[in-house]
Image (tube, rainbow, N blue to C red):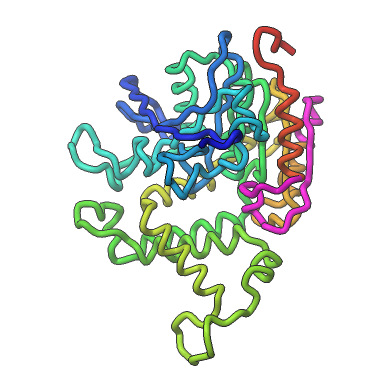
């Protein structure tokens, strides 16, 4: 029996695009695929569409399950569904796997139509701008001219922000969660250490490890372990693990503490399901995104042409994308007299808080989203 707030069983779809896509780097993808899922029903005037932009390790499987016994629902299943904060009784929700991904969209592990072999190192560097442009192509494919809302957390929040810059007429509301207008030097440093762990793995083979039948597993494990530390707060780690021992002290370099066991588990799991070349490209896209660069670093000037209304959300314990970074976006919007709501949620989970079913956080989203009008009378 299906729960009344569950999406239920879902299935991915593939959109193929034959028209070439020019990337910010100047390279051109001659053709590409995007894998996506949809939840809810598109209304008659197609005014209730919401796109979900995923973060670094996310994908198109945002909500629902693939079969009745599936133990792993979509990564934002706690948020999306009938009567949930993003209510699929009202909204038509689209999740997709970005270009360069490793869950079905065109990326390094997919087949290059020219060589009939995996792209590998030859797959071009993609950026936030490229992702938003490809997402706009997907909306065209679905016949949707304007989004009710675009929503994203972390790297997804950067995409949500960029939607309002690149396609101001196509977005009515933007929800930018646990994000920033660009990365700090410290964040870029974390990304570089993670990439070096992968690139220096002997099994990396310059990014063409597919041809060797191997995976740079050690590098991926270290990259994920490092990243995971930055996604959690010190308090959250202390509360969950503290200095708990696995067993009696053995005075060795094997797993001695519960925290070590947890990190190794996360690293092993990630290395078994994520592509190293995708990880490199996702972190590089984070590094490169800086929309104010062409405006001399002036974020207020950058956001002067946005037309969307905004909800900007941050979390008190998030030190990787701190509340101060969200407030930079809020200030720039207010400088332009844009309509913006801001909430700083008290939460102990660190950066990962945006994925958690925190009651206060979800209540804010529920209230905000319930006030978005859809249907024939949606004009505001």
At 24% from the left and 43% from the top, the residue drawn is 118
Q: Nearer the viewer, residue 175 or 3?
A: 3
**Residue 379 shows in this picture:** yes
Q: Nearer the viewer, residue 47 or 67?
A: 67
Residue 318, placed above or below residue 292? below
Residue found 37% across the figure and 66% down from its top: 218
9 displayed left or right of 304: left
Q: Position of residue 47 (x, y in %)?
A: 60, 15
Q: What x and y, as percent, mark residue 254?
A: 44, 83
x then y, percent, for residue 330? 77, 36
Q: Percent position (x, y) of residue 181? A: 65, 41
In front of the other: 333 or 359: 359
Image quarter (top left, top right, bottom left or bottom right) of the C terminus? top right
> Please, is residue 358 above or below residue 312 in the view?
below
Say if the magenta span includes residue 355. yes
Range of residues picked out in magenta: 331-359
Point out the residue furthest to the front here. 1
Which image quadrant for residue 271? bottom left
How many numbered marks appear?
0
Q: Quadrant of residue 29?
A: top left
Residue 174 horizontal side relative to residue 200, left or right: right
- Whether residue 197 is visible, yes or no, is no
* Residue at (53% x, 33% y) in the render: 7
Please check the rendered image and state whether residue 140 is part of the magenta-colored stretch, yes or no.
no
Q: Is residue 303 above or below residue 65?
A: above
Residue at 26% across / 52% down in the picture? 208
């Amino acid at each position: 029996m299906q729960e009344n707030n569950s999406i239920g069983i879902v299935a991915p779809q593939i959109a193929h695009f034959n028209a070439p896509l020019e990337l910010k780097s100047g390279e051109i993808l001659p053709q590409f695929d995007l894998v996506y899922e949809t939840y809810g029903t598109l209304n008659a005037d197609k005014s209730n569409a919401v796109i979900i932009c995923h973060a670094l390790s996310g994908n198109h499987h945002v909500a629902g399950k693939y079969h009745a016994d599936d133990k792993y629902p979509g990564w934002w299943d706690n948020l999306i569904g009938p009567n949930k904060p993003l209510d699929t009784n009202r909204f038509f929700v689209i999740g997709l796997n970005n270009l360069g991904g490793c869950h079905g969209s065109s990326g390094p592990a997919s087949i290059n139509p020219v060589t009939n072999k995996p792209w590998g190192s030859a797959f071009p560097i993609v950026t936030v701008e490229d992702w938003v442009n490809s997402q706009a192509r997907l909306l065209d494919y679905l016949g949707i001219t304007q989004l009710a809302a675009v929503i994203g957390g972390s790297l997804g929040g950067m995409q949500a922000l960029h939607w309002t810059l690149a396609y101001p007429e196509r977005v009515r509301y933007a929800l930018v969660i646990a994000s920033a207008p660009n990365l700090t030097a410290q964040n870029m440093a974390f990304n570089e250490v993670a990439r070096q762990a992968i690139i220096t793995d002997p099994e990396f083979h310059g990014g063409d490890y597919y041809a060797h039948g191997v995976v740079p597993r050690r590098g991926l494990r270290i990259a994920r372990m490092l990243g995971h530390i930055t996604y959690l707060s010190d308090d959250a780690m202390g509360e969950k693990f503290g200095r708990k021992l696995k067993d009696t002290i053995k005075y060795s370099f094997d797993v001695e503490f519960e925290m070590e066991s947890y990190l190794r588990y996360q690293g092993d799991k990630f290395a078994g399901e994520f592509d190293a070349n995708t990880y490199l490209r996702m972190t590089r896209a984070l590094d490169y995104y800086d929309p104010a660069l062409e405006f001399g670093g002036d974020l207020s000037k950058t956001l002067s042409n946005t037309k969307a209304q905004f909800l900007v959300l941050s979390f008190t314990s998030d030190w990787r994308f701190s509340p101060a970074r969200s407030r930079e976006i809020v200030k720039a919007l207010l400088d332009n007299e844009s309509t913006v709501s801001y909430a700083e949620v008290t939460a102990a989970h660190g950066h990962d808080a945006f994925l958690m079913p925190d009651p206060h956080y979800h209540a804010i989203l529920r209230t905000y989203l319930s006030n978005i009008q859809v249907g024939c009378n949606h004009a505001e």
